[in-house]
Amino acid sequence: MERTEKKPRGKRGQGCVYRPGNSRNWWYKFSINGEVVQRSANTESRREALDTLKKEILKHASGETVTDDKVTVDQLYDMLLSDYKINGKCLWWAQQNWDKHLKPFFGGKFAKHVGTDALSRYIESRRGEKAANGSINRELSLLQRAFMLGYETQPRKVIRPLRFHRLAESKPRQGFIEQKQYDALAANCSDLYMRAMLCLGYSFGFRKSELLTLKVSDVDLMADTIRLRDSKNGEPRKVALTRDARMLLAACVVGKSSEDAVFTRGTKPVVDFRGTWDKITLGADCPGLLFHDLRRSAVRNMIRAGIPEVVCMKISGHKTRAVFDRYNIVSEKDLADAAKKLELSQSLVKVEHVDGNTQAVQTETIQ
């Protein structure tokens, strides 16, 4: 009787290939980190199936392959929020974008189902809500970062990073105000809180959100300083007050406890002042002016005053030079002033041609 010798088994962990009775293709099977991976090799050749098995084992061992294909976008975004918290980034901003915009669309979805089609549908949805291209870009950048964190983990939670084509953004606003317009706005401020916010916005470029979260304990009248704890860039900063700013803030905080809001209507903290702002801008003949335009004006005024740019960025709270340059906009008056300075410098030296020779003659400039 003919005897068939059994082939030796492979070592534990090397996996195996087999062909189910109802399939023409070979399958492979192995275990990694206690999880069994079992898939078709999509080939009728046993040798090719063995090659596929070896490649898959190497991929899983090096973390290049996703073992859990049920990872949700929510889980990836939790990683992003954790990363923001650990690195001291603006956590509330990332959380707000998720809760208001990203979660209603991507919440509960498997990460493997998010690709270019899903991103295109999201963009169309946000455009239907009249969202600006810049806002959509920031939101998708957060989602992209969440996927990258999942891709960089060991083992990987997603098979590839998320990529999207950034939408064209509008040019930065050119709105800013001159001293005469500021004086007109101040004259139309009948509310103390609005007059103080106007002063701080025009002098230091503070954001509206930064001003509305100020508490009395943030104002130190003895040291003539103000401290911004809730800053958009996540970094608190302290600024020395001008005389006008100190007087206005002193009037705003009188009679209040340390945890009270600085800017109040009666006893209630100010949370929205759009109606008041529209009223004073119309009264000052500045319709369409935004409160945020004060920030741009403050940056330009500090540069005009000769304050070093690094100090300006500390005061205004700009972390990157690229964003700072978007606010330091040159106006037509700046260009005209530059032309006058150029003419003045050129008038100091008068060039005369005598007998074909060029001679420089110093001339006296009348001031």
Image (spheres, rainbow, N blue to C red):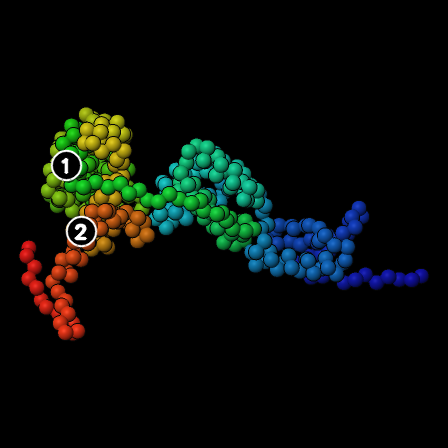
Report how many numbered discs are placed on residues in the image: 2
Instruction: Determine the residue positioned at 15% across, 28% down.
Output: 190
- In the image, residue 85 lies at what x, y percent? 38, 46
Q: Quadrant of residue 194?
A: top left
Q: Nearer the viewer, residue 129 or 361?
A: 361
Q: Is residue 178 above or below residue 160?
A: above
Q: Amino acid at mark 1?
A: Asp
Q: Earlier in the sequence, mark 2 or mark 1?
A: 1
**Badge 2 is on which residue?**
337
Residue 245, position in %: x, y? 14, 40
The residue sitting at 62% across, 50% down in the picture is 35
Residue 183's disc number: 1
Q: Position of residue 36 (x, y in %)?
A: 65, 50
In the picture, measured across the screen, residue 136 lies left or right of residue 196, that is right
Q: Residue furthest top?
A: 266
Which residue type does callout 2 highlight? Asp
Q: Residue at x 11, y 62 (%)?
A: 348
User: Which type of secondary structure does the marked residue at label 2 adopt?
Assistant: helix
Give the Cα distance between marks 2 and 1. Answer: 22 Å
Q: Nearer the viewer, residue 16 or 215?
A: 215
Q: Secondary structure at mark 1?
A: helix
* Image quadrant assignment for residue 296: top left
Are the residues tagged 2 and 1 within 8 Å (C-beta)?
no
Along the line of sight, the residue nearer the viewer: 318 or 151: 318
